[in-house]
Amino acid sequence: MYIRKTKDFKAGLLFLAFGVAAMVFSTEYRVGTSARMGPGYFPFVLGGVLTLLGIVVSLGSLAKGEGTRKRRPFRLKPAVLVLSSVVVFGLLLQPLGLVIATIVLIMTASMASDEFNKKEALLNTLALLAVVLIVFVYLLQFQIPVLPSFLAGRL
Amino acid sequence: MELLSNLALGFQTTLSPYNLFYCFLGVLIGTLIGVLPGIGPVQTIAILLPATFALPAVTALIMLAGIYYGAQYGGSTTSILVNVPGEASSVVTCMDGHQMALQGRAGAALTVAALGSFVAGSFATLLLAVLAIPLSELAFKFGPAEYFSLMVFGLIGSIVFASGSAIKAVGMVVLGLLLGMVGTDITTGTHRFYFGIPELADGLGFVPLAMGLFGISEIIKSLERTEKREVLKSKIMGLWLSKKDVKEASPAVVRGTLTGSLLGILPGGGVILASFISYMVEKKISRDPESFGKGNIRGVASPESANNAASQTCFVPLLTLGIPSNVILAMMAGAMIIHGIQPGPRVITSNPSLFWGVIVSMWIGNLMLVILNLPLIGVWVKLLSVPYRLLYPAILLFCCIGIYSVNNNTFDIGLTALFGLLGYTFAKLECEPAPLILGFVLGPMMEENLRRGMLISRGDPSIFFTRPLSLAFLIMALAMLVVIALPAVHKKRDKAFQEDEKC
């Protein structure tokens, strides 16, 4: 498989999936006529267009001749670590507060780098924690839970 | 002359110490992120957007605008010194700028970039001031059909100027339009596509979308790459330009300014394209084209002027017609809406101090930037030595906190991660995210205007073709599509975007 083909092919499939999903979900709403468009009209039409585009792009990828042979290594680690660090932050923020969530976020995200160094990451965490508490909580008065919910109100 | 009294109003607004401070802050932050590779104005504005809610509307816009064109200035510093473009539009500056640095002429390169940008910025701001009123008077003749066609023109513009496959860009636009449909339908009040999740009743958040699609995916992409970056540690000799340099560079500055000013106005058009095209033009008309790429001062002067001029005139469609011509302006439109100001031709009459204040602040911002950039080059270079592995967790953290603060709910953070994944997927599949964001912002408005147009014409689609302005926009949009389909332009486009990926 030449790289140009696979990328376009997958892109086409992605468009197709979104397009079909849009069309299916739009029919739940009143579609209406072109003179009096219901809430489902525009999304349905767009979904149709996107589906068509998906098909065109996918077919187009098959017709291509030589593509470039350069293949970049596909590494899951950075993506997984970065994304999960964000998600975990979101999950931990309200029950456990900003301090803990920040520590988890920075440590997890730092591990995504090739040049990860535990001591550095720890120092970075402490520095950023200080910056965040001073700038966001104290100076800018962001309304954000700082301490875990079972401690808040006790300190 | 009315123009003078308007400018006077603008100066009055901008020269308050409060606004001046935020203007300075904006250009400072802008320069900083322009210098740092891997983080750009899009991400920064997305992060700082929540912080601007507490500021008055004028101040918020002044600061955000400052960040934008400040980043253009900052990007040239790293391109010249370290051959790493700090900004996408500074890619071209790498070519001759770094060569000049290696020849010991870094000072001249940096100075010509700064001064050229200042001249260009001043001219472009003037152009903006002059065009403002005529354009907004024109806009009053706009009905729903015209707005719809204009938006179509804008979206097609973003496709034309998007790198990579045009047909995939079309797909991205449509996808963006669809994502804009999520939420409450304005006309009927129905909840659409919200799958029983109450947080989606207001639609997908713009900030999580932008941050995830651009910010997070950019970070993941950077982490996958494993090249090292080296800093030019040698001392930078004298900052001044010789008389010969000035003589050579001046016409290039003029040409770059004109190119940039024009290209900036076009929707979808860009600052990036302005710098590329001005470089190509410069090379073509030069008596000595081989010297380009080896340290020709015109190769720095022209694109730097162009990209700064473009970053000013790209405000024209936003401030006069209410149509943002690129992602960053879309965010500023978002900021205006959040402050209760509906972007559009009415802004100039309902909020004249805001309008003229922002325009004047651009010129003042340019002035501040020249003063900032020249003496502080040493400081910027030091900043470059912060290792990326310490920087990007900070970026993630600020993003998350910023997003949480918009609505005080953590669902948005999860949404950001989802868009981060989507953005990363798009990057892997070589799909441009910029048309998607434009589609997302324009989607609901397009739908509303389409519906109104059809309602007025009682279901007759020819209304879009029979009204002259509307027809004009559609024809221009079609013309743009035809132009890129032509093989000659197609090749040039591919080449321009390939150079982008080399640096």
Image: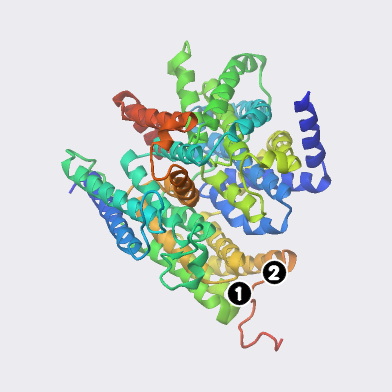
Q: Amino acid at mark 2?
A: Val
Give residue B311's quadrant in the image: top right
B439, B207: nearer the viewer: B439
Callout 1: helix, strand or loop?
A: helix
Residue B476, given in percent of the width and then of the height, sits at 43, 29
Q: Chain of mark 1?
A: A
Circles 1 and 2: CB atoms closer than 8 Å? yes
Q: Upstream in the sequence, badge 1 or badge 2?
A: 1
Position of B191 compared to B233: left or right? left
Q: Is residue B322 left or right of residue B161?
A: right
Indicate the position of residue B250 as horizontal and vertical percent values. 62, 17
Instruction: Give residue A3's position: percent from left, percent from top.
Output: 24, 47
What amino acid is at disc 1?
A: Leu
Residue at numbered disc 2: A137
Q: Residue furthest front?
A: B458
For residue A106, above or below residue B133: below
Please say whether residue B327 is visible from this viewpoint.
yes
| Marked residue chain, label 2 | A
- Tell me the crowding category of disc 2: few under 14, some 14 to 19, or many 20 or more residues within 10 angstroms, Cα based: some
Task: Give me the disc on residue A98.
Answer: 1
Give the residue at x 42% y 59%.
A39
